[in-house]
Amino acid sequence: MPGPKNLDPSSSPRALLGAELRHAREKAGLSQEELGVRLFVSGSFIGQLEAGTRRIQPELARMLDEVLGTETFFTRNCDAVGRSKYPDHFAEAAEAEAIATAIKEYAPLLIPGLVQTAAYARAVCRAYNPTASDKAIEDLVTARTQRSKILDGPTAPLLWVVLEESALRRVVGGPPVMAETLRHVTDCARRHRVIVQVIPFTAGAHAAMAGALKLMDFEDAPTLVYFEGAATGVLEDDPATVRRQRHTLDLLTAAALSPKESLVLIDVVAENYAHADHP
C-alpha cells in the first residue's frame, strides 16, 4: 500500500511532517509512549516531533518507516525538512522559537536576535565570520532579521528578555548602530511586543553567570531550554533541567531592574551613543 505523498517543503514542512507522523502512529494503533518504546525515545519526544518542535533526524526517520510501515516516506521527506537557513547549531532552536507561545531569554553579552536591527546583526555576523563573503553575511543577516517577524503577528509569543548591562555597553558596529538598536529595543517594549529587564553591574553575582539561556513554551508540547555558546547550542527537554532553568530565570528577573527602570537606563545609554558621549 503506498505511503503518504511527499511534503511540500515550502509550507511549514516540519509541522506537516509532524502531522503525518501523528496520522501514521494513530493508524498503527500506537500511543506516543508505545511508539517511543519501539524507537528508544520518550513518549514526550514523540509528541514534540508531532508538534513540530523537534526535528526528525535521518536515522530516526528510517526507524519510523520500519515501525509504522510507511515504506520510505519519512526517510525521503526528513532531508527536505532538515534544510535550514540558520547555522546548524541553532537551526532546531530557531524553528522551535517560531511556534513558541512564550519565550524567556537571558542575554549576557549581546542584544538578542529577535530584537536586533539589521546593522547590529551585520556587525555580529561579520565578527563571527571574518573571512566570509558579503553575500554569505547578508544571507545570515536576512535570516536573523526575518526571525523578528514572529513578534508582528496576531499570535505573537510573549517575549521576555533579561539583558546584562554589558550588552548595552558593548559597542557593536559603532555608536550610531548601538543608538539605533537600543532605541529599537525600547520601541518594541513600548509597543508591548517584548518585556525587557536589565541586570545592572551593581547587582553583582547572580544565578546565570555561566552563559546565555532561553526557555520556550508551546501550546501542545513540553517546554524546551536552549543553552548557547560560541558556535554551539544545546536544546534540552529534560523536565528537571527545564525546572532548574526556569528557577534560574526567575532569580534573574528578581535581580534585574524593573521593566520601567530598565527602559530608562536603555534610553540614557542610547542617548549617549547618539551623541557619541558613551564612556
Image (cartoon, helix red, strand yellow):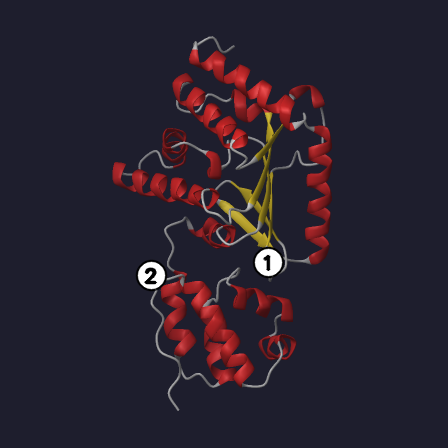
Q: Identify the mark at residue 123; answer none if there is no mark.
A: none
From this viewpoint, is residue 202 visible?
A: yes
The residue drawn where x is 59% and y is 56% is 218
Q: Is residue 80 above or below residue 133?
A: below
Residue reaching furthest front?
Answer: 154
The residue drawn where x is 38% and y is 66% is 79
Q: Secondary structure at mark 2?
A: loop
Kindly indicate the quadrant of the structure image that contains residue 204. Answer: top right
Quadrant of the image containing the N terminus:
bottom left
Q: Position of residue 195 (x, y in %)?
A: 59, 34
Dot 1 amino acid type? Glu
Q: Position of residue 201 (x, y in %)?
A: 65, 21
Q: Position of residue 31 (x, y in %)?
A: 62, 79
Q: Is 65 in front, or is 10?
A: 10
- Which mark is nearer the camera, 2 or 1? 1
Q: Identify the mark at residue 219; answer none if there is no mark.
A: 1
Q: Is residue 17 above or below residue 176?
A: below
Q: Is 215 in front, or is 234?
A: 215
Packing grade of label 1 (10 A; few <14, some 14-19, many >=20) is few
Relative placement, left or right, of 213 versus 16 is right
Dot 2 amino acid type? Ser
The residue drawn where x is 40% and y is 19% is 174
The CA span between labels 2 and 1 is 23 Å
- Label 2 with label 1: CB-CB less than 8 Å: no
Residue that label 2 marks: 10
> In terms of sequence position, does the residue under pointer 2 or pointer 1 come before the other?
2
Packing grade of label 2 (10 A; few <14, some 14-19, many >=20) is few
Q: Position of residue 18 (x, y in %)?
A: 49, 69
From this viewpoint, is residue 42 visible?
A: no
Kindly indicate the quadrant of the structure image that contains residue 152. Answer: top left
Q: Secondary structure at mark 1?
A: loop
